[in-house]
Image (cartoon, rainbow, N blue to C red):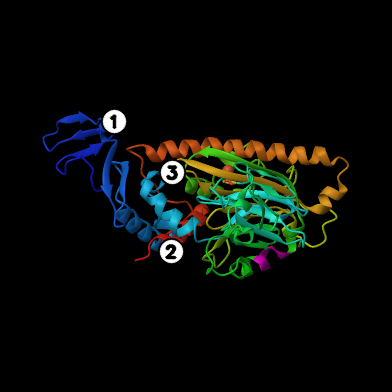
Amino acid sequence: MGTGCRVQPDRTLRNGHLSDSKGNVEQVKYEKLSFVPSTNRYGAHRTVPNKTATTDQLLDQLKKLAEMPLNQATSLPSSVYVSEDFLRLEEQEIFYKQWICAGRADVIPNPGDYLTHHLAYQPVTVMRQKSGEIKAYSNVCLHRMMRLLENRGHCEKIVCPYHGWTYDIEGKLIGAPHMHENPHFKASDYVLPPIRSEIWEGWIYLTLDQDIPPVKEQLSSLQEIVRNYRMAGYQHVVQQDYEWVGNWKQLVENFIEGYHLPVTHSTTVGEHLTVGETRFPENPHHPIFTYQTFTKAYGARIGRAHENNTTLTQEQRNTSMLIGVFPTHLFVLAPDHLWYISIQPKGTGQIYIRYGSAIAPEVLAASQNRELLINEVSDILDQVNEEDRIIIEGLYKGANAPLSKPGLLCWLEQQNHEFIQYLAKHLCKS
Ligand code: FES
Ligand SMILES: [Fe+2]
């Protein structure tokens, strides 16, 4: 029971009733237990559900969970999903400091093609340059700080929708209406602040941190594991952005375990899955990524190699990998396609989701009807997404419930425990 709980120590809570030492029973008024203010070690004032612990207590619990063996560890305490204070800490220590995936690089193949993204509260433009390189910079105007571009598209120059300051695709200011009348104004002083970016295996990664090691270095051992799939050559077919109800960690946890697949997705991707054959790496404790492999039985509509694929081993030909690059880049790499989500919090109870899929080139090349193929893959994945959306919404309701508490993890949730260890490493500094 967390600090600040109004349940008196001489009374116990059972099945929604309080009973005292004399056996008198009283129905708990949950609405009265709702919100109390408190402060944390960072001095921040906050409002959190009364049943939650302080941030310091949550961090202590997180640390303990991370140190436990998997068969003794539970999932995270419910308060980490609903605490505003905890989210502030995640933004500072994770979303401003780690690599965040912005999608596939072939979404923007030509100079002037761009996509937008954000790193917590920092809007970002990712632009294909004339050199063919991809460059990222702040998507905020240098005049009165208007957001510049939205969604994705193509442009020859970036024109601010507010007063018309205009930038080239490298981010340099090339025009500003009426500003030449100000002798102190010099256009060359204005360049959109660059944001560190990197392409790895066809993925675009962004970070605001100048010091963390490159993605390529951090994922070098994963690169060896996925080499035969040649995913850099998979061709983008879908990219969409969504907002769901839920906490971002619940979606990470949902994506990286296959335990729920035969149940939640019983008529879609779970149908041909033999969950008992899930395999984890022998040495799973890599600090930034996690994965498991699973196989697709004969008859699965997607998830098996095309006959023209000559690089996968016999075993890999029907083996998919479920990969999490922490904190929030999650994807299934199958012999014939991949699909991914990259997520960020929008408050404690909403999630920004970038979702997309790509198809192996030999599958597309052999297709008689490319559009039909893309639609078929998209339809299946849309159904899977919808099944997950309902789950995440239910999980968030659960996390807010006064009586909710976490249970033991299953061996199939090994990656969830690795995620707990990742969070502990970045959030528990002392
Ligand atoms: S804010 Fe962009 S031109 Fe004024
Ligand atoms: Fe799922």
Q: Residue under circle 2?
A: 425
- Tell me the crowding category of disc 2: few under 14, some 14 to 19, or many 20 or more residues within 10 angstroms, Cα based: some
Q: Position of residue 194 (x, y in %)?
A: 60, 61
Which is nearer the N-term, disc 2 or disc 3?
3
Residue range highlighted in magenta: 223-227
Distance from the alpha carbon under mark 2 to that under mark 3:
21 Å
Res. 7 in view: yes
Q: Residue under circle 3?
A: 348
Q: Which amino acid, mark 2?
A: Lys
Viewer-proximal residue among 106 and 325: 106
Predominant secondary structure, magenta span: helix
Q: Secondary structure at mark 1?
A: helix
Badges 1 and 2: C-beta atoms under 8 Å apart? no
Q: Secondary structure at mark 2?
A: helix
Q: For the C terminus, give its image quadrant.
A: bottom left
Tag nearer the camera, 2 or 3:
3
- Tell me the crowding category of disc 1: few under 14, some 14 to 19, or many 20 or more residues within 10 angstroms, Cα based: few
Q: Residue under circle 1?
A: 31
Which is nearer the N-term, disc 1 or disc 2?
1
Distance from the alpha carbon under mark 3 to that under mark 1:
20 Å
Viewer-proximal residue among 148 and 247: 148
Determine whether, in the image, residue 178 is placed left or right of residue 3: right
The residue depicted at 52 percent of the width and 69 percent of the height is 211
Determine whether, in the image, residue 161 is placed left or right of residue 376: left
Mark 2 within 8 Å of ligand 2, using the beta carbon: no
Q: Is residue 199 above or below residue 140?
A: below
Residue 254 has which mark?
A: none
Badges 2 and 3: C-beta atoms under 8 Å apart? no
Mark 3 within 8 Å of ligand 2, using the beta carbon: no
Q: Position of residue 279 (x, y in %)?
A: 60, 58
